[in-house]
Image: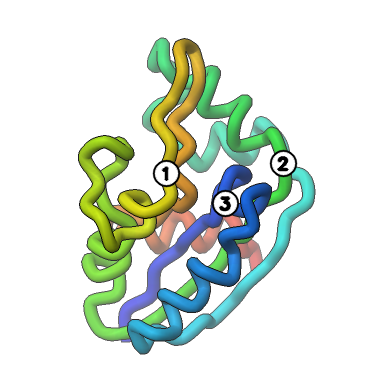
Amino acid sequence: MEQTFFIIKPDGVKRGLVGEVLKRIERRGFKLEKLELRSAVSEALIDQHYQDLVEKSFYPPIRQFMTSGPIIVGIISGPKVIESWRDMMGATRPEEALPGTIRGDFAKAAGENQAIQNVVHGSDSEESAKREIALWFKD
């Protein structure tokens, strides 16, 4: 069974979308393997998570956003869960996300010098999923 890592970002937690996101995961038939509320996330952990973006000029607002409030982190499993979860999330940019996807239904476009508030994150490959699971769940 394939596994992937996901985050319900600060905007999703703040706006009360946790139940909706989890309902969509379960309705799709995926199994919740782990689920944790992280009330505070360090900049160091976010920098490790987004290691490929840290040197980009647009990264500081992402760091600020991802450390701005509680998040939910988890692991889900199921057949082709990585690809399916990415489809369920929708395109990264809210204006490109189709209705019916999490981002299409709930994401908000970014203001100037702000990170996109797109509610959720999901690993983009099997390698990323393994790396992110090991990073966030050390046990």
| Vertical arrangement, residue 55 with respect to residue 69, above or below | above
| Location of residue 86 (image quadrant) | bottom left
Query: Which residue lies under the disc numbered 1?
Result: 107
- Mark 1 vs mark 3, CA separation in Å: 9 Å
Quick one: quadrant of the N terminus?
bottom left
Residue 99: in sight, yes or no? yes
Residue 78 percent coordinates (x, y): 33, 84
Q: Secondary structure at mark 3?
A: helix
What kind of residue is marked 3? Gly
Query: Which label lies toward us, 3 or 2?
Result: 3
Q: Residues within 10 Å of mark 1 (few under 14, many from 20)?
A: many
Q: CA distance from mark 3 to mark 2?
A: 10 Å
Residue receiving disc 2: 69
Q: Identify which residue is drawn at 62% across, 72% down.
A: 35
Please give the name of the residue rendered at 48% of the width and 49% of the height, measured from the top-left corner.
119
Q: Secondary structure at mark 2?
A: loop
Q: CA distance from mark 1 to mark 2?
A: 17 Å
